[in-house]
Amino acid sequence: MASLVKRTRVRFNYQGRFQILLVLLFALLLSIPVFQGHRLALLFVRFALTAVLFAGIYAVSHRRAHLIVAIAIAIPTTLGRWLPEYNSNIDWFATVTLLTALFLAYTGFVIISLVARSKVVTFDTISGAICGYLLVGMTFGFLYSVVEVLQAGAFNFQVDPSVRPGADFLMRSQLLSLIYFSFVTLTSTGFGDILPVAPIARTMAVLEAMVGQFYVAIFIARLVSLELLYSKSRSNPND
């Protein structure tokens, strides 16, 4: 009886963990155009990313090892973003941004691994697959911003490329624009309004485009095949 209660509690505690993260990621991505070009973007991104970090920790907290690693990365990432040095020190900004990308990449890797090992396709499994895809795009967006702030001109912005004098490093890094560019690259849409110029920027863009194509071709195809097998087993219980 005790073991049954324990299993029930675990199932209840982690039910919908991917859906929470998915809602926050969508809220962040859909709100970015509203704040694009405004200084309110700095405050908004801080709050939104903090919420995403907490949701990411919850999403991977099913195992203690994953939880410890996620918290270890999230603490300096969250605190560093709220300190004054984040706006004025380029090394500080680059470090915090790289840690953010590392957290997003780690969370995405854990979620994708969980979904890949799943034997049954549920709504939460589909939410996890979408979260993994969005986290890949977010990770590259932050990496691009580090490249841009460390090597100004690494990307050619065809629309509104100017940065006001005295702008903080979040604005200089063109983070919001490069998150948009990241998803355009991930989906191989290629509008051409932002172009990678520096060799490292081009290499990263090619790598992201390849990841996006392989993700859809392999991972999503696996989920579809699992659902077909599950549906077949339900329709033929005697087989």
Image: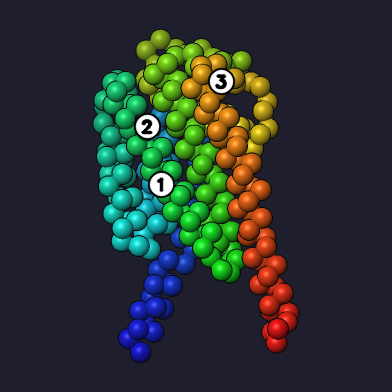
Residue pictured at 52% horizontal, 49% vertical: 132
- The residues bearing labels 1 and 3 have C-alpha atoms spaced at a distance of 25 Å
Picture quarter containing residue 202?
top right
Residue 196 is labelled as: 3
Residue pictured at 68% horizontal, 77% vertical: 233
Q: Which amino acid does label 3 sit on?
A: Pro
**Is 125 located above or below residue 191 in the figure?**
below
The mark nearer the N terminus, 2 or 1, is 2
Q: What residue type is labelled 1?
A: Tyr
Neighbourhood count class around disc 1 (C-alpha, 10 Å): few under 14, some 14–19, many 20 upward:
many
Q: Name the residue under label 2.
A: 97
Of helix, strand and loop, which one carries label 2? helix
Of helix, strand and loop, which one carries label 1? helix
**Is 55 located above or below residue 233 in the figure?**
above
Can the viewer see residue 34 in this picture? no
Residue 143, x across and y down, in percent: 44, 30
**Is 214 located above or below residue 155 in the figure?**
below
Q: Mark 1 points at which residue?
A: 106
The mark nearer the N terminus, 3 or 2, is 2
**Is 102 located above or below residue 149 in the figure?**
below
Look at the numbered discs 2 and 1 and tell me whether their residues touch, using CB distance below 8 Å.
no
Of badges 3 and 2, nearer the viewer stands 3
Q: Which of 45 and 213 is in front in this view?
A: 213
The N terminus, quarter of image: bottom left
Residue 168, x across and y down, in percent: 37, 20
The C terminus, quarter of image: bottom right
Neighbourhood count class around disc 2 (C-alpha, 10 Å): few under 14, some 14–19, many 20 upward:
many
The mark nearer the N terminus, 1 or 3, is 1
Q: Which amino acid does label 2 sit on?
A: Thr
Of helix, strand and loop, which one carries label 3? strand
Q: Which residue lies furthest to the bottom in this view?
A: 1
Residue pictured at 55% horizontal, 61% vertical: 125
